[in-house]
Image (tube, helix red, strand yellow):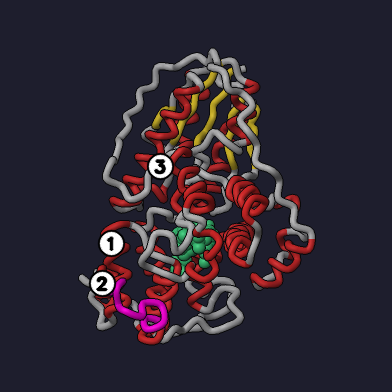
Amino acid sequence: MKGLYWVRNDLRLQDNLSLNAFLEECQEGLIVWCPTKSNSRAGMHRQEFLEDSLFHFNSSLKLLGQHLHIAENNAAVEFEKIVRQFSIEKIYFSSLSSQEEKSEEEKVIKICLSYNIDYFSSDQETLINERDLPFELENMPYIFSDFRKKVELNLKIHAPLSLTIKRNLPLQQFNYVSKFKVHPGLIFHGGEDAALRRVHYYFGESMAIHTYKETRNGMLNSNDSSRLSPWLSLGILSPKTIIHELRLFESDHGANESTYWLLFELLWRDYLKFFSRKFKKQIFLEDGIKRGKHYISEKNQQLFSQWSLGKTPEVFINANMNELNHTGWMSNRGRQNVASYFVHQLKLPWIWGAAYFETQLIDYDCDLNWGNWLYLSGNGSDPRSRIFNIKRQAEVYDKESLYQKKWAP
Ligand SMILES: Cc1cc2nc3c(=O)[nH]c(=O)nc-3n(C[C@H](O)[C@H](O)[C@H](O)COP(=O)(O)OP(=O)(O)OC[C@H]3O[C@@H](n4cnc5c(N)ncnc54)[C@H](O)[C@@H]3O)c2cc1C
């Protein structure tokens, strides 16, 4: 069989059902990554992390005698050519939750249908598979805690899949040129090795996971939280692998509230992914899933520039924006605060803030970013108000102002 593997947010060899199927079924093939609309909106930090991740994924593929091809056009345009040129018989890919990605998928499926070729798609983005949810997506509980309680009643997390083919495959290489860029100076490196090193360090060597619940709101130290999100966002690491490693750690060192809390946060991730599948384009609308806006906003460019450049009257907000602009990273506590300030204090349209985060965050994830912004705006599913007292937050979470001093503009 001649196959085409469409690389999406699944830049990994381990726990990758679609890649496994491709390697098992095909004797000849092509592995291709295509830029998406969201990639064209990426700023420097996000772009560099992606390029580094593609470079490392290609290095992993080389161990299997494979090569990653980087296309110039989007998948639909590119595959129309490839399918004809190379007489492809089957396309393999992972399906994603967000709307632009879904519509890409539909275009690729259309190509398959029009050329009468087969396709294999797997649902492997979340911790819990959609088919294992104890309800249909349309009946998904509206509020996170209701979702979590229902899901936890009979928690079904499959073990991660190991790569079954470890030998070099005689897959034919097509003459399709790729260029890779390496970025040695990054704060996070792409690649499964780097991701797993972080997991083992955070769980094992440092044992920081044992105090995660107490430290997760910290902003200054790299072990305050797991910092696994950059790898999760590109699918370099699967959530099932994280839970598998967590269980191994728990069996050696014991479970506690902190180890549970990491699962809790990954359930938040699942909730927002299913929320995005359910509400589709509505998560990008200013009035979200509620009828009518539940806050007043004004399109004030000057206030927006001050916020994005970290030049507001609030030192705490500025420090967080400064860290984001310099590194592409911001802690969860920081994100909650700058977003709440943006919406409720500056009264700017929340979709502007979400779009800015999309350009800057190295761990940008469409469903998590837009879902969290929508939630904070009050037009999502939040039953409570998310208006933070910024000065009080700074006192609680940065008592000695060390974070604010470090990231002072
Ligand atoms: C306005 C706003 C925008 C956000 N945008 C993104 C984004 O684009 N990409 C992204 O990965 N996260 C986003 N988050 C969620 C959260 O801030 C990050 O996942 C977290 O800070 C990443 O750090 P960590 O891996 O150390 O998290 P940890 O605290 O170690 O949590 C482990 C994992 O749980 C998940 N998680 C944690 N908090 C949340 C949350 N609030 N919602 C959903 N899942 C969560 C993430 O996958 C995270 O990697 C956003 C939050 C807010 C408030």
Identify the element where label 1 is drawn: helix
Mark 3 or 1 closer to N-term? 3
Foreground residue among 72 and 406: 406
Residue labelled with disc 1 = 325
Position above or below: 84 against 20: above
Q: Residue at x 63, y 67 (%)?
A: 257
Residue 158 on the magenta segment: no
Q: Residue at x 39, y 59 (%)?
A: 222
Three-letter amino acid code at disc 3?
Answer: Gly
Foreground residue among 133 and 148: 148
- Would the CB of label 3 be found within 8 Å of ligand 1? no
Q: How far from the left and from the top, in percent, is residue 392?
A: 40, 86
Q: Residue at x 71, y 71 (%)?
A: 146
Mark 2 or 1 closer to N-term? 2
Three-letter amino acid code at disc 2?
Answer: Gly
Three-letter amino acid code at disc 1?
Answer: Asn
The answer to whether residue 314 of the structure is visible from this angle is: yes
Residue labelled with disc 3 = 190
- Side of 53 where 108 appears, left or right: right
Where's the C terminus, which quadrant? bottom left
Q: Residue at x 38, y 57 (%)?
A: 361
Identify the element where label 3 is drawn: loop
Where's the N terminus, which quadrant? top right
Q: How many marks?
A: 3
Q: In the current view of this chain or complex, which residue is farthest to the left?
A: 409
Residue labelled with disc 2 = 310
- Magenta span covers which residues? 393-404
